[in-house]
Image (cartoon, coloured by chain):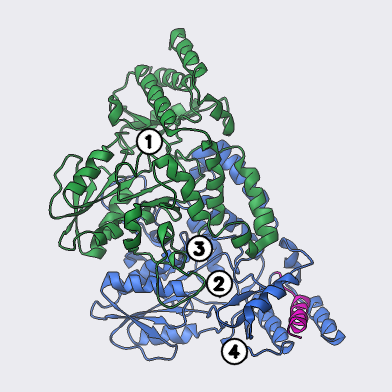
Chain colours: A blue, B green
Amino acid sequence: MSEQSAARAAELDASDELAVCRELFSLDKETVYLDGNSLGALPRHVPDRMRDVMEREWGQLRIRSWDESGWWTAPERTGDRIAPIIGAAAGTTVVGDSTSVNVFKALVAAIRMADPARDEVLVDATTFPTDGYVAESAARMTGKRLVPYTPGDPMGPRTAAVLVNHVDYRTGRLHDLPGITAAAHEAGALAVWDLCHSAGALPVGLEAHEVDFAVGCTYKYLNGGPGSPAFLYVRPDHQSSFDSPLPGWNSHADPFGMTPDFTPGTGAVRGRVGTPDILSMLALESALDVWDGVSIEAVRAKSLALTDFFLEHVTLESVTPAAHAERGSQVSLRCADAGAVMKELIARGVVGDFRQPDILRFGFTPLYVGFADAERAAAVLASVLA
Amino acid sequence: MSEQSAARAAELDASDELAVCRELFSLDKETVYLDGNSLGALPRHVPDRMRDVMEREWGQLRIRSWDESGWWTAPERTGDRIAPIIGAAAGTTVVGDSTSVNVFKALVAAIRMADPARDEVLVDATTFPTDGYVAESAARMTGKRLVPYTPGDPMGPRTAAVLVNHVDYRTGRLHDLPGITAAAHEAGALAVWDLCHSAGALPVGLEAHEVDFAVGCTYKYLNGGPGSPAFLYVRPDHQSSFDSPLPGWNSHADPFGMTPDFTPGTGAVRGRVGTPDILSMLALESALDVWDGVSIEAVRAKSLALTDFFLEHVTLESVTPAAHAERGSQVSLRCADAGAVMKELIARGVVGDFRQPDILRFGFTPLYVGFADAERAAAVLASVLA
């Protein structure tokens, strides 16, 4: 890389309003961490919070913490912290279980809400595999047929629901959430969105675009920690008819009544199942503090500037679209011997990941990745390839 | 209480081989904690382990920890730590998701394994409610009929599977696991056991009694922390036909192959779904260290001695059976105005819990509850009632 590139990166970093956020994370100067789309970095303050959770809330208060430390309401409270980041209102989003389990809840519920005569469930053909596996199970258990879907394909009178990833995990392509949701509604179907690679990376606008259901993970751009619980969004006017295939005691109207019959609770709570994993949940809740005062629009603007900058400085073919409207917050480059190249990049301190068969994937997390990082990553990549 | 009772308690504590375990837990002298059947006490060493997990494994190694810190294999590794406590072999037990979600997996899988002509699913009529709610959903989604079951009821040619709680959460009654499992097999049906109130409290003998599937929670007698992930046991000879309704990418034969078709993995891994909640999982794994060198038979012997002692010193009617063979590790007493009485007990440092409509519930966790605790609890109860 030229001195010019480094100077340009320094200039961009100097005028970056989000640059101050980097200090909130545990990062080292030796590493350019471009894998926040797989596991977000640790917000520095989380271990202290968790020591208090373990030693005082669990260790001293014990069972009393379910009430006194607010454990019982953590799933809704944490959902309300995520809601503004994905363009949702308070009371619509609940945290718990894995993304896969939430895909099952949302898709089965969507199918049950559709006209029973509609027999097809559409899933984007390049979906993250688990969505496809779970959708296959949801279709099997509700007597529907799974149909691979490519955005733009027609939906029709047989379509019950469509499940689409907002951002393709492999290519980084951003799908047209407003357009596909509107097309589903036009066809009389329901739209379920997987936001794993967009929540915390770009504006989603769930409410504005009348999305029916959405799920997403919290350990990528939301930095909740390894395997932190996922979220489930149910559109407010669907909440009262949300018929979960996993009706556990936590979603009951009176969970401590211990009644033999299931009476579902009202609101976001209906998306809960069993006892929530409190340690992981509270680590996530604490991690969300880094979003205080941050606008998702600013995150998106920086994300596009970062990926533009990186794309300008690499020579490999990008499978991530050049058009901003079609780009998530990652850059995927096609590369011969990509596995070995990524190994060498990591050895030299540039951490991205390898996706089969020939993709180098670099995630750009605007809260803690800067332009100098992008410049260094491009320079190291060039030297590895040379 | 008489001085005689206190002397007898001191004598029993002095000859208790498990008394040394108490020091491993975070407890205070002011409290008699008899709610370990709701939330186990904190093993003292867990917060230090979790600081390392957060600061080094997540904070420094980040994504590399999935391999280098063994995160990826934690569900099976932790399952293998639980297996000997429940009488299971290595490779049969996997940790992840909530108990409710695991009931769904196990029961649907059992139904699918049974002769399709069998149309009834039996669930014990006094089950912990969530088991009933989830069983209703499992039956609905597989086209079966749910039938309330009382241990001793006949099973027959219509029975596909039976779901039973090993210990009734309300009364503390221990059900006959060997007998009911054998009766199910005799009738050509499969037996699914919920071990929430027996795992870590008494010998279960899953392998010896040829149990088909079992699930259980880890935050009660296994002290894994609030909402720590549950376990799922699949009998070795059922593993290859285990057909999970939640086939996530973590249960795939080649999870990073990202293939569009689902090919299930072999062994316990097939019980996994999505990305496991690593913080909760590793806290549980660490908490299991207190079991090193402890035999579940010794735990059971002490549990029975403790509950015998407590029963001898209380005057209220016990709904927990007097017969050892029918008693779990708790004592439930019938009491007018039980809610208010429990509130007062807690105010005086004796922590049990209240179950609708008239039950005082006291859990005895042999690893950290002693006879002096039982004596004090009985004395405080007598003074509250007086």
Same chain for the residues under marks 3 and 1 in the image: yes
Q: Are marks 1 and 4 in contact (CB under 8 Å)?
A: no
- Of circles 4 and 3, the one toward us is 3
- Assign a secondary structure to mark 4: loop
Label 4 – label 3 distance at C-alpha? 28 Å
- Residue visible at 54% across and 37% down in the picture: B290
- Give neighbour class at mark 3: few <14, some 14-19, many 20+ (Cα, 10 Å): many
Q: Which residue lies under the disc numbered 2? A: A199
Residue A374 part of the magenta-drawn span: yes
The mark total stands at 4
Residue A147 part of the magenta-drawn span: no
Foreground of the two, A27 or B314:
A27
Q: Are marks 4 and 3 in contact (CB under 8 Å)?
A: no
Q: Which mark is residue A321?
A: 4
Label 1 – label 2 distance at C-alpha? 46 Å
- Which range is magenta? A368-386
| Image quadrant assignment for residue A355 | bottom right
The numbered mark, 2 or 4, whose residue comes first in the sequence reads: 2
- Give neighbour class at mark 4: few <14, some 14-19, many 20+ (Cα, 10 Å): some
- Assign a secondary structure to mark 2: loop
Same chain for the residues under marks 3 and 2 in the image: no
Q: Main secondary structure of the magenta part?
A: helix
Q: Which residue lies under the disc numbered 3? A: B275
